[in-house]
Image (tube, rainbow, N blue to C red):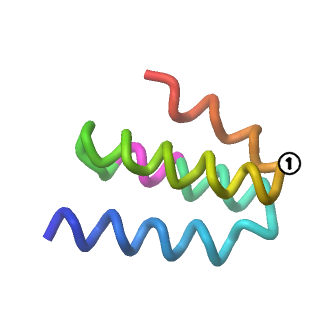
Amino acid sequence: MARAMLEYTKTVLHKVSFDATLFCKEVQKAVERLLPYEIEELKEFILSLIRQNPELDKCLIYLKQ
């Protein structure tokens, strides 16, 4: 079940990556719902999206723990 939530989160983040504000809101939700080891995997995914879309880097503050 937890793995499904991580994959779902990645899908949502990819779909909203056109809007930095919406992307940040979804990152906040993900950090609240995912397990710590899943958040680490999510960070890697988000960093790859940021390489393609640099304006998304604002959301990195939500990943600092």
Identify the image quadrant of the C terminus.
top left
Identify the image quadrant of the N terminus.
bottom left
Q: Which residue is found at the position 53% from the left and 73% from the top? A: 12
Q: Position of residue 10 (x, y in %)?
A: 47, 67
Residue found at the very far top of the displayed protein:
65
Q: Position of residue 34 (x, y in %)?
A: 29, 50
Q: Which residue is found at the position 58% from the left and 66% from the top? A: 13
Q: Which residue is mark 1?
A: 55
Left or right of 9 in this view: 59:
right
Left or right of 58 in this view: 38:
left
Q: Which residue is found at the position 79% from the left and 55% from the top? A: 20
Q: Which residue is found at the position 76% from the left and 38% from the top? A: 58
Give above or below for 1 relative to 23. Answer: below
Q: Position of residue 56 (x, y in %)?
A: 76, 49
The amino acid pointed to by label 1 is Glu
Residue found at the very far left of the displayed protein:
1
Give above or below for 17 relative to 41. Answer: below
How many C-alpha atoms fall within 10 Å of the one at disc 1: few (<14), some, or many (≥20)? some
Q: Is residue 29 magenta?
A: yes
Q: Is residue 40 magenta?
A: no
Is the stretch drawn in magenta largely helix, strand or loop?
helix
Q: Which residues are magenta?
A: 28-32
